[in-house]
Image: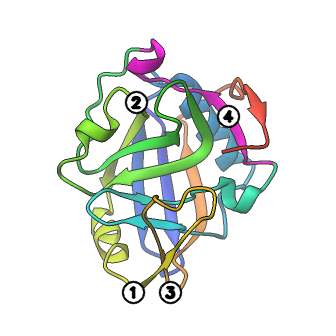
Amino acid sequence: MNPIMCITLNNQKQIKIELYPDIAPNTVNSMITLIQQGLLDHRPIQRIAYDFVLQFTYNGFNHDPKCEYIIDGEFDENGHSNPIAFEKGVVGMGGDGSSIASGCDFFIVIGHHCQERLNGKFTAFGRVISGYEEVDRIIQVPTKKIIRADNPNVDINEPLVPEIMEKVTVETFGIEYPKPHILRYGES
């Protein structure tokens, strides 16, 4: 059985995500390691890009050194076969779109026409299997636009009232997953 990631929000509602270690093993290892260390708990959702993605973190949780690291991108552009198409509900990992991925900057696709921007360029590693109504709710909350000096063209809308991942757990069904292979620390 594939591992199941469960995000419990501050309203006690849950989003459950099936992870695909057979398709993106190092990315799944990264998520499981972060979850097991409690590093995703009590974190605010940082980015809504309307008609594109709901991104739980955009900058390694405000440059937390335990979360801010780079791994190999497990996608076609980087020579890694990844057959998952980025359609609504697919979970992916942020990165540079050519070779690397963040260790923690994950997102859920919320738009219907994202495949051209994402397929083959970013790591797809899971899919929402329950609680998508919470994703729909979050993308409708009032937001404030954030302009980053280092990348002013990126669409970042942060909830005015924080939406918090209170607790993130993972059911591995007794399988032990190794720590991820990390390329370098200090940027995401």
Q: Is residue 112 visible?
A: yes
Q: Name which residue lies at 31% across and 66% down.
A: 50
Q: Name which residue lies at 40% across and 54% down.
A: 16
Residue type, label 3: Leu
SS at circle 1: loop
Instruction: Indicate the position of residue 81 as horizontal and vertical percent values.
Output: 38, 15
User: What's the distance in space between the residues labelled 2 and 3, CA to CA?
Assistant: 31 Å
Q: Residues within 10 Å of mark 4 (few under 14, many from 20)?
A: many
Residue 98's disc is none
State how the image is colored.
rainbow
Foreground: 54 or 34?
54
User: What's the distance in space between the residues labelled 1 and 3, CA to CA?
Assistant: 6 Å
Drawn side of residue 124 relative to residue 179, left or right? left
User: What's the distance in space between the residues labelled 4 and 3, CA to CA?
Assistant: 29 Å
Residue type, label 4: Ile
Q: Which residue is mark 2?
A: 121
Task: Check the image and report above or below for 50 versus 53.
Answer: below
Residue type, label 2: Lys
Quarter of the image holding residue 33? top right
The answer to whether mark 4 and mark 1 are in CB contact below 8 A is no
The answer to whether mark 1 and mark 3 are in CB contact below 8 A is yes
Q: Which residue is mark 1?
A: 142
Q: Earlier in the sequence, mark 2 or mark 3?
A: 2
Q: Which residue is mark 4?
A: 70
User: What's the distance in space between the residues labelled 4 and 2, CA to CA?
Assistant: 15 Å
User: What's the distance in space between the residues labelled 1 and 2, CA to CA?
Assistant: 30 Å
Q: Which residues are magenta?
A: 66-80
Q: Which residue is mark 3?
A: 160
SS at circle 2: loop
